[in-house]
Each structure stands twice: as C-alpha cells, then as structure tokens.
Image (spheres, rainbow, N blue to C red):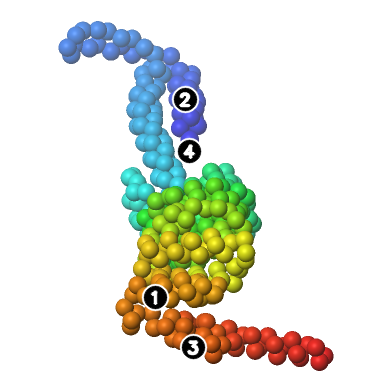
Amino acid sequence: MKLRYFIGFAIVYIALVTIYAFYVTQDTFTLHNTLWFDFVLTLPLAVWLCLPMVVLLLITWIFMSIGAVVVQFKKMSLNRDVDKIITQIDEQMLGGAGNDRVFSNVRLKELSKILKRFYLLPNLSSNLSNNEKFDNNFAQLKDIEQGGEVPKIKLNAAHPLYRKNLENGVNVDSNKALNVLKTPLDSMNAFSLYQNAQSYEVYSFAWEKIIESKSAKLIEKALNLSPNHLNFANISKIIESNFADSMKLKDELLISALKALNLSEREYLSLAINLAKNLSENNINAVLSFFERLSKEAENSVFAYFYMLLEVGKTSEASELKSHYPKNDYLPISAFLELKEKGYPLLVFFDPLYFRENKEKKSTNTENESSENRI
C-alpha cells in the first residue's frame, strides 16, 4: 500500500472515531501534570480518545517515510548498477574487455565478473532494444558490415569489424591509409577468438591502396613512416610500379626500404626477375642504375644485379663485376658465361626450379590454346 493512501485512510478513520465518540458523550477530562512542570489541560473525552491514535499515526508515518526513502535509495542504487552492466555489455560488444566498476549489489557484481569471461558479438539482424545508445551502435556496426565507414565509433582493435572499418575508410580515400600505417595495431592484443583482425593484414591492405593510387607523394610519405609496416610483396609492387609508371621515386628511399626488410638473395632475385619482365627502352637504364647502387649497399642483392646485367645482354659488365669476387663465388654466372653460346635460358642458371615451373605453365597454356583452336 502506498504511504499516501495509508495516511489518508488513517486520517479518515481517526476523524470518524472522534466524531462518533463526541456524539456519544460530550464530557470533558482535565489532566493535571506535576512532572517537571505544572500544567492543567481540559479537553473533551473524544479528543483524548483520538490523541493516542494521532501519535501512533505520526510514529507510523515517520517509520514508513524512512522505509520509503531507504527503498528509493536502494532502487536508485540498483538502477545505477544496472546502467553499469549495460555500459559494460556495450564496451564488450565493441571489442573491449570492460572496465572495472564498483557495484553496491553483490549479485550484479557477480554478473559483471561472469560477463567479463565472454566475448560478446552483436547479432546485427536482431530487433531493436529501445535503448538508444545500443541501437545506435548496432546501426553503425551494420553500416560498417555493409561497406560504410564510421570514424566516430569507438571500436577496439580486437573487434572483428575494426579492420573492416579501416578498409572501408581506405576504400573511400587512399590518403587515410597513412593513418592506418601510423596506428600501432601490434600493441593492441586481439582476442584469440578474433584471429581475422591480425594487424599485418590491415597494414598490407593499407599498402595495397597506397600503391593503387600511383601517387609518388603518398608512397613517399608512407615509406618515410617509422615503422612503415612494409613487407616484401608490397615493396616489390612499389618498385615495379615505379619503373613501369615512371613515378620517379628516389633510389635512396627505395634502397633504404629494401635494406630495412633484410631480404634474402632469393627475394632480391625474385624482384629482379619480375622487373626484367617489364623492361623497356624507357626504363632499362634506370633499372640497371638502381640495381648497381643497390648491390653496393646490400650484399644479398649482388646476385640479382648479375641476373639483370645478363638479362639485358651486358655480359662484359657482368664479367667485370665477377672479377671482383673470388673464383668460387657466384658460380652460376661463370657457368652461364662459359655456356652462353649453347643457347641455354638464363633462368636455368639462376633459379632452375622457377624456370621449370614457368616452362610447365607455358606448356599447359599452349596445350589449352591448341585444344580451343581444334574446337
């Protein structure tokens, strides 16, 4: 029963009892007090009858008011704890671990600890919750999933849609790839459940978009970042694009990037083989000059420089370079120079397995073309 209803009922009851008592008798009673101080009080019997009930009502009202205040405070405290649980769910839904909070309710504190032991992924096809903050976050996550960029959402790097949001932003504007490369994703430990959020994939995607832009200025800015999160595949694309599209990136910048990767001889050779496929009169001198400078700064690239010289027919330059090394070093070059009149392909001496794979691919393509012609 609500307090105001109880007080109203009690007042009506006391009034009725008083009226009835006054109706029954109009006698009076005089109270003589000698305790502490003297006084004399004369009142009708009906009034003396209702006074204890009034006092009892006042005491009851005080206790019930205190109880109502206590209940209200408990309710407010419970609501605050529930709000904390909702906030924690929201944080975990966005990929966070959930901050530590103080709870007044022991059971909700226990629930909070239990929730922290779970990874919470949103069901984006679920119905609205009528919680504005939650529903807004769900709408933003759905927008990200459908290819949109939401820069304001506070997604943790551990969230599976974090990478997707970065990729969406880079798709819209390749200049944003620089911001991706500046983000220290490696220091953000992803949940073991979210293996798709591996940082190297995000950085690799950012580099792909930067390379696709074919903007020398943007590529130069990205290469000058420290760290720049570059890998062999992307530096190869940059160098190939540089000489094929005449982006005119500085040799020092490219050489510095290659040296920072500590590439093996095979990787440098692979770079040279791929570049040799796109050599032309417009870029051949620039490529040779680049590999000459590179061979002087990175020892593992010397073998690739030999390949490039022999690929363009500069055998005398290759022989001169070979003379600076011990006789037993770079034997494939010596073998090619001895047997070049036999007509063996250059790649046989540098990478026989790669040559064999290419030969098999060419044979397969030739057979397919012949079959199509017969049809």
Residue linked to disc 4 = 1
Which disc number belongs to residue 11?
Answer: 2
Pinpoint residue 217: horizontal percent, then vertical percent.
Answer: 54, 47
Q: Which mark is residue 322?
A: 1
Earlier in the chain: of badge 3 and badge 1, it is: 1
Q: 10 Å neighbourhood of mark 4: few (<14), some, or many (≥20)?
A: few
Q: Is 162 in front, or is 359? A: 359
Q: Are marks 2 and 1 in contact (CB under 8 Å)?
A: no
Q: CA distance from mark 3 to mark 1?
A: 16 Å
| Amino acid type for the residue under numbered disc 3 | Leu
Residue 90 visible in the shown view: no
In this view of the protein, can residue 79 be seen by the observer? yes
C-alpha gap between disc 2 and disc 1: 116 Å
Image coords of residue 274 (percent x, y):
55, 71
69, above or below 32, in the image:
below
Mark 4 or 3, closer to the camera: 3
Q: Marks 2 and 4: CB-CB under 8 Å?
A: no
Identity of the amino acid at label 4? Met
Crowding at dot 3, Cα within 10 Å, few <14 / some 14-19 / many 20+, comes out as few
Circle nearer the N terminus (4, 3): 4
